[in-house]
Amino acid sequence: METNTSYDPSFAREVFENVDSGEEIKMCMQCGMCAASCPLREHMDYPPRQIFSMIRAGKRDMVLNANSIMMCTSCYTCQVRCPRGIPVIDVMHGLAHYAISKGILTRKDTAVFGREFWQQIYKTGRIDEKDLSRRYFFADGIITGIKKSLQMARMGIIMLLHGRMKILPEKKIKGIKSLRSMLDKAMQTGKGGSEV
Amino acid sequence: MAEVEATNQTLLVVGGGMSGITAALEAAEAGYDVILIEKNPYLGGRVTQLYQYFPKLCPPNCGLEINFRRMKLNPRIRFFTLAEVEKISGEEGNYNVTVKLNPRFITEKCTCCGKCSDVCDTEIDNPFNFGMDKIKAVYLPHEFAFPMRYVMDPSIVGTDEAKKCKDACKYDAIDLDMKATTFDLNVGAIVWACGWTPYDASKIEYYGFGRYKNVITNMMMERLASPNGPTAGKILRPSDGKEVKNVAFIQCAGSRDQNYLPYCSGVCCLASMKQSTYLRDQYPDCNITIFFIDIRALDRLEDFYTKVKEDEKVTFIKSKIASITEDEATGDLLLEGENTNTGERIQMTFDMVVLATGMVPNSLDLESAPSVSKDEYGFMTLDPNNTGIYGAGCVKRPTDVASSVQDATGAALRAIQSVTRR
């Protein structure tokens, strides 16, 4: 880590004001429970505890470019165990959302997957596994799409055999309009709540 | 015994631990009549279970003996063991208290010869040692017990076992027909000193207390180190009785955690450091690791922290341990966490783990008692509109023995002021 000891509160203020659940990090006492509980700890640049510490220290670029903020799988282990009741997942997703809104795409795949997932929920109210995979795989063009599809072909067949994926398209849920109005409302309330 | 004289100038002290004993003695020595009641069969409370005090590392029995002697010499104190408050009615200056006296089944004639215990075959978990060993169902609570008298577990009363014990007693000190009785007291003021209970560590699921034998609590460690404990003072790990070479202390086990015990008990850091000296005295080669969030050794007690830190066999690591996993074959324990100073992942194996659990105030809730005000964590607060009942010691805040004694002296003065105002 850098040994720059100067303290710059401007980034912390930026996070408190613009990031969904950003103010929650004020509660952090740096115990490391989140870091030790995280199943993806080995793959992250910095665990949540360090991200929170870096926000306070004003390390804007390091935080927004960290792969960690887009790596959270919402397993909730850290959030359940946090001794100060910080919604760690909400903060991590909030930071990811904020980074994307600033044009920082450290993990493009994650962002694309999130976008496609969201759009499908918005359209039909449920996830169509094959349609979601198709959109996700082919987001970077046909050739990478075919490559990625072939890699996952075996998984696809197993899912088909077990009835986890249907050949026919999924239908819209009943009351899709009510769901959409709820989602619209949610989009308006969150900080920085623009479409991904 | 049911005739207990008391007036509205009498003080009642509920709880015969260090705080209760102190409040009772200070008031009695100032010339007031005091009645002290205690629910255990012995006085002294949690302090009797400790091996040494921090920071002086001296044995608590010494101070207790002095206090017991003061009590014996003072005719103004009357005390009852195995007694509980059932009901309090009335108001400051004129309380009516119903006290329930549970049967001991052993009378004052007991000489502690131990014959009843010798013939008794039934064994029960020893509550004094947190169930780490068994005792006979007729027993002396511990060897410094005051009053020095045996007690019979109610579970064997009515069986042939109990009759066998009665027949073995040469002094006719066993009364199997003893029943729970109640009596009423008229008192002017009450000192509430009902103490604390160690936080139930089995609630912290990821530490495996109760499932893994070698995960113990700090109070169990006190018993393991005590010469009158389950291992006669030798610190051995519970699963196989082996000597320990590598021990971890986990600070804030449940404490400072919204999901468990939200506050800091203020003594566990010092208790763990004190217990590290127990280990170092017995095992010169033993490695000790203390995992902490912050070390809270306040005021002059920081000197003790400095002293322990100088020991090269004691390592302090800033981390809240996230999980303990037991190796079933060896009973060793794998600890995982994040070293928050370096950011490195911790994966370390230990022979034994001591959880530094916090203090939970004992309940104040009584049916039809005058309401006592409490804070959000259940500790008693002083309500200026509701005088007459005064807290003392750990029922007011988690604290060490020295502060409890000071606090109890203050509570005794408040209670005296309350009755002299009448």
Image (spheres, coloured by chain):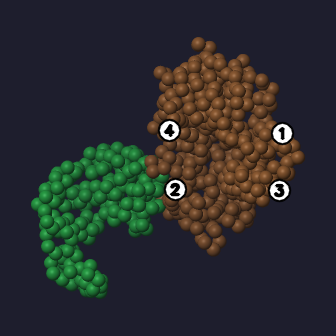
Can you identify the residue that label 4 sits on? Answer: B378
**Residue B136 in picture, x, y percent from top left:** 76, 55
Can you identify the residue that label 1 sits on? Answer: B109
Residue count near mark 1 (Cα–Cα under 10 Å), binned few <14, some 14–19, many ≥20: few
The residue shown at (64%, 68%) is B331
Q: Amino acid at mark 3?
A: Val
Q: Nearer the viewer, mark 4 or mark 1?
A: 1
Can you identify the residue that label 2 sits on? Answer: B204
> Residue B400: which quarter of the image?
top right
Can you identify the residue that label 3 sits on? Answer: B119
The numbered mark, 4 or 1, whose residue comes first in the sequence reads 1
Q: Nearer the viewer, mark 3 or mark 2?
A: 3
Q: CB under 8 Å between callouts 1 and 2? A: no
| Discs 3, 1: same chain | yes
Gap in angstroms between the C-alphas marked 3 and 1: 19 Å
Q: Nearer the viewer, mark 1 or mark 2?
A: 1
